[in-house]
Image (cartoon, rainbow, N blue to C red):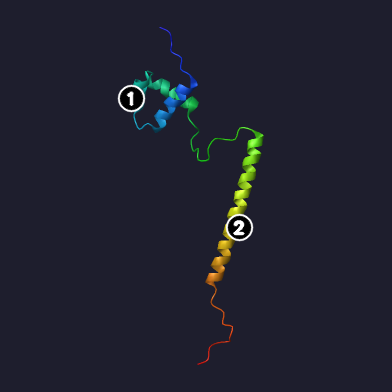
Amino acid sequence: MKAKRYDEAFKRQAVELMLTGGRSVKEIAADLGVSAFTLYQWKKEHAPPPGGGGGAAPKSMAEVIRENAELRKELEYVRMQRDILKKTAFILGEPPRNTTGGSRR
């Protein structure tokens, strides 16, 4: 019996089903006609790294430089917002100034 060959797209879709399908690995394996062991092997090869929060890692130095520039712009914007909030909090937290030297009744 000749072993079946599956293309990379099929393997990636199978792994995605494992990660987001809401079904057991055995059920997915049975639907796809492969063993659960095979699915776990594909998962090792094709699953995104854990903790992925930020998306895929940059692939070239040009992408790293571009991403770094974008992050620096965003950081500057956030710092500006923070400074504005600090100044606003200070202004609102000050006791009112009495420019007339006190009220006389």
Q: Is residue 96 above or below residue 71?
A: below
Residue drawn at x 57%, y 63% is: 86
The amino acid pointed to by label 1 is Glu
Q: Decide which of tag 2 and tag 1 comes sooner along the chain.
A: 1
Q: CA distance from mark 2 to mark 1?
A: 53 Å
| C-beta proximity under 8 Å, tags 2 and 1 | no
- Give the number of the mark in front: 2 or 1: 2
Q: Is residue 84 above or below residue 61?
A: below
Local packing at callout 1 (Cα closer than 10 Å; few below 14, some 14-19, many 20+) is few
Local packing at callout 2 (Cα closer than 10 Å; few below 14, some 14-19, many 20+) is few
Residue drawn at x 58%, y 54% is: 78
Q: Is residue 58 above or below residue 103?
A: above
Q: Secondary structure at mark 1?
A: helix
Q: Is residue 77 above or below residue 51?
A: below
Q: Which residue is mark 1?
A: 27
User: Percent from the top left, x then y, of residue 6?
Assistant: 46, 17
Specify the quadrant of the image occupied by residue 65.
Answer: top right
Q: Which residue is mark 2?
A: 80
The amino acid pointed to by label 2 is Met
Looking at the rendered image, the quarter that the N terminus falls into is top left
User: Percent from the top left, x then y, of residue 71?
Assistant: 61, 46
Specify the quadrant of the image occupied by residue 2.
Answer: top left
Q: Residue furthest bottom?
A: 105
User: Percent from the top left, x then y, of residue 20?
Assistant: 40, 33
Total label count?
A: 2
User: Percent from the top left, x then y, of residue 39?
Assistant: 41, 23
Residue drawn at x 49%, y 21% is: 8
Residue drawn at x 50%, y 40% is: 53
